[in-house]
Image (spheres, rainbow, N blue to C red):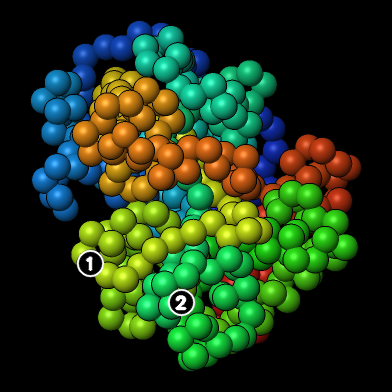
Amino acid sequence: MRRITSLVVALVLAVAACGGDGTSAEDGPLQEIGDSEDKVVIVAWAGYIERGETEAAYDWVTQYEADTGCAVEVKTAGTSDEMVALMTGSDEFDLVTASGDASLRLIAGGTVQEVNTDLVPSWNTVDERLQDAPWHTVDGKHYGVPYQWGANVLAYNTEAFGGNAPTSWNVIFEPMNLPDGEPNAGRVQAYDGPIYVADAAVYLKSTRPELGIEDPYQLNDEQYAEALDVLRTQRSLVGRYWHDAFIQIDDFTNEGVAASASWPFQVNILQASGEPIASTIPTEGATGWADTTMMHVNAPHPNCAYQWLDWSLNPKLQGDLAAWFGSVPSVPAACDGNELLGAEGCTTNGFENFDRISFWKTPTDDCNGTEAAGSCVPYYRWVTDYLAVIGGR
């Protein structure tokens, strides 16, 4: 079932049409942290806010609650569009772990507020590559705190591939027999989100250099049409468009899925369960996410929210989360001495892959401010056209 409902599409189109650089809270960002409220409510990706219920060793909520008196409530979202819809449609949420294809929309729509980094003592420990990243920094103002980052990997069943890692995304984009001799049709999956158009563009950037694709989020009409053609071809191969990480885990375990774009989170859980699953970044590179914890412009629990922003940067949390999710910490110190992550964890999770990843960002008609308006295909078209692709039209 498709996750992107008509409500989500309407909100996406409304936010995409907004202009400006966004707004902060009415009186500006908080200047000092006061008494804790009773709770903090966070919209988050699956696996991002753990309290030991899934696996006892992975718990970065309990201590925060004990230290602050703020109970943590989590609303899990499966796509960036769902996150934008939730944050735009309600004032009940304080924070959101937004990826780059949501963060600028939230800023432009005035949905999130500027963060006073002076109230985040751990700010200076953040990876310098992320501190002023364009997906959360506008006109020198920070609209969030970096959380984790990583690549959208190609997950594959090692038995289907004879123990050898696939080297290209073609195994999920083009009809073929896999090394086990069986067709890939019906055995591959694709992500249920319009930003997945960029995955096709990454593939074309390498395999069709004559198209001149430089940035998979800045596509002219010709490049965009070719990316849609790749996705239409893929449509005949896809057994499920996934948005729920746990459903994809079940599909790899029980439904014969051989390969799919995925997150390291699913791969880690499948491997821990003894399933013959591995992952790779193919030669064409990959899309990826650099997630930012952003604060709602009308956050009902701002004091608890600011305390979470700083808590989210402590090295133990950052390292434990990276070990759990397969991501890379936003705080490099987390790579040293974390028991769960291990000495090689940051290397394994791709700390050195930063320059190989095309991080999610919202496509705009002015090519993210680099060209005249109308030069690139804007995100609202990605939304409507991708719905048509996955609907078989």
Q: Is residue 139 left or right of residue 128?
A: right
Which of the 4 quarters of the picture holds residue 78?
bottom left
Q: Secondary structure at mark 1?
A: loop
Given contact means CB atoms under 8 Å apart, are the residues at marks 1 and 2 in contact?
no
Q: Residue 205: x, y in percent? A: 75, 59
Q: Where, quadrant-wise, is the N terminus in this rendering? A: bottom left
Q: Nearer the viewer, residue 109 or 324?
A: 324
Which of the 4 quarters of the picture holds residue 263?
bottom left
Q: Residue at position x 35%, y 8% from top? A: 32
Give the labeled residue for mark 1: 274
Give the labeled residue for mark 2: 161
Residue furthest bottom in the image: 182
Q: Residue at position x 17%, y 39% from top? A: 59
Q: Residues within 10 Å of mark 1 (few under 14, many from 20)?
A: few
Note whether 87 is above or below 272 in the view shown. above
Amino acid under disc 2: Phe
Q: Secondary structure at mark 2?
A: loop
Q: Residue at position x 62%, y 73% from top? A: 170
Q: Earlier in the sequence, mark 1 or mark 2?
A: 2
Q: Residue 232: x, y in percent? A: 66, 79
Note whether residue 8 is visible.
no
Q: Residue at position x 88%, y 63% from top? A: 210
Which of the 4 quarters of the picture holds residue 43?
top left
Q: Residue 300: x, y in percent? A: 32, 30
Amino acid under disc 1: Gly
Estimate the spatial distance between the alpha carbons at disc 1 and disc 2, rounded to whole Å.
17 Å
